Image (cartoon, rainbow, N blue to C red):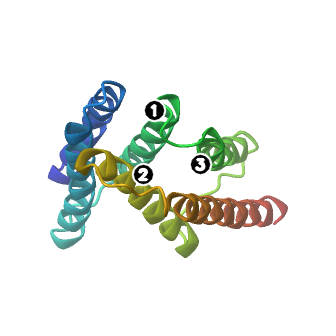
Amino acid sequence: MTLPNLITIARLILVPLVIVMIVNTRWDEAFFLFVAAGVSDAIDGFIAKRFDMKSELGAYLDPLADKALIVSIYITLAIVGIIPVWLVIVVVSRDLMIVTAVILSWLMARPVTIAPIVVSKLNTAAQLVFAALVLGSKSLEIDVAAIMPAAQIIVAALTLASMGAYLALWLRHMAG
């Protein structure tokens, strides 16, 4: 068990805490915990690379923690009426498609490795920035209504582009 893996596990533990804070409209705490989770992601990645502490477990845990955080926050924000349900459907559908493709490939004895691609990294960044914008605006009581439609469209477009790119890669893999 490496230090980066322990940090990633701590990030996973933060997920339900952030959710509880959102449900209870404790925006300052939700925003602070979300930022802490984001900083922990950067720290564990830096330590793993800088001190050669990469591990197979970490390769699975890190994206799992990222997705648990994003999906949970988006679903919770939709449930409490802060973001539109259609955006959550787009975000969650992409992740379900990827997981389904990996499982199906494995079941068909054609395992596929899903590695981050540029559009996927942009997508994740946009999703995280959007969540930070929403939580930060609530915490700091800043009116961001004017930019929310554009921010939602950017997140949706990048999510759909990432979904399409992964689907194309998976289809090529399965046909090859």
Q: Which residue is mark 1?
A: 76
Question: Disc 3 versus disc 2: distance between alpha carbons?
Answer: 15 Å
**Amino acid type at image mark 3:** Val
Q: Which residue is mark 2?
A: 63
Q: Are marks 3 and 1 in contact (CB under 8 Å)?
A: no
For residue 13, say whether it is visible.
Answer: yes
Q: Quadrant of residue 112?
A: bottom right
Q: Say left or right for 161 vs 65.
A: right
How dense is the environment of label 2, judged by Cα within 10 Å: few (below 14), some, or many (20 and up)?
some
- Could you tell which of marks 3 and 1 lies nearer the N-terminus? 1
Q: Is residue 166 above or below residue 84?
A: below
Residue shown at 50% from the left, 70% from the top: 122
Q: Which residue is mark 3?
A: 91
- Could you tell which of marks 3 and 2 lies nearer the N-terminus? 2
At which x and y percent is residue 156?
62, 58
Q: Is residue 168 above or below residue 27?
A: below
Q: Say left or right for 116 vs 29.
A: right
The answer to which of 73 and 80 lies nearer the viewer is 80
**Amino acid type at image mark 1:** Thr
Q: Where's the N terminus, which quadrant?
A: top left
Considering the numbered disc 2 on the image, is that residue within a helix, a strand or a loop?
Answer: helix
